[in-house]
Image (cartoon, rainbow, N blue to C red):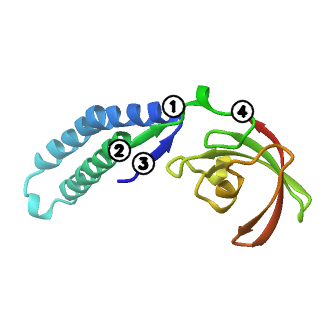
Amino acid sequence: MAEIWLTAEEFENRKQRLEYMKNEGRLAIAEALKEARAQGDLSENAEYDAAKDEQAKMEYDIQQLEEELKNAKIIDESNVDKKTIGVGATVEIEFVNLGMTQTYRIVGSAEADPFENRISNESPIGAALLGHKAKDTIEVQTPSGLQKVRVLRIER
């Protein structure tokens, strides 16, 4: 698995989720399996089948999360140039062609959530912004066409 860039906050969130899944999650599934087994014939027991499916999904998710955490690279906020856009930066940009502004946080692809304005450093806009400074104007090829983007502000 390739490196996964995570903020320290997201790394801690994932560690906590993993701990929950390994403990409370597994216990809940074990209890569901126990209750389903108590109902008798397992060959036609839909609750047992559902609990086994949930158990398999939980184990897969645990394995995936462990692998992500093992390959995680934490973004060191204290060691970054605050005047240049990098992973972890919050940027306010203006789409010159559209006359609108937008604020994004540049994150690793594992943390991206466009509904929360968290865009991946691998996305067209995120990748194009990397390394630029406030007042830079760049052209970005997006799925909706070529956009002229001006960097208004960078925060860390």
What's the CA distance linking mark 2 and mark 3?
Answer: 13 Å
Q: Position of residue 11 (x, y in %)?
A: 46, 35
Tell me which numbered mark, 1 or 2, is placed earlier along the sequence: 1
Residue with the mark numbered 3: 3
Quadrant occupied by the N terminus: bottom left
Q: Nearer the viewer, residue 81 or 100?
A: 81
Task: Inspect the image, locate mark 2, and give the three-letter code of the amino acid beneath it.
Answer: Leu
Q: How many marks?
A: 4
- Seen in the picture, residue 70 relative to 1 is either above or below; the reply is above
Labels 4, 1: front one: 4
Label 3–label 4 contact, CB within 8 A: no
Task: Inspect the image, locate mark 4, and give the three-letter code of the amino acid beneath it.
Answer: Lys
Residue with the mark numbered 4: 82
Give me the residue at 23% from left, 35% from top: 27
Task: Inspect the image, locate mark 1, and give the three-letter code of the amino acid beneath it.
Answer: Ala
Give me the residue at 23% from left, 49% from top: 55
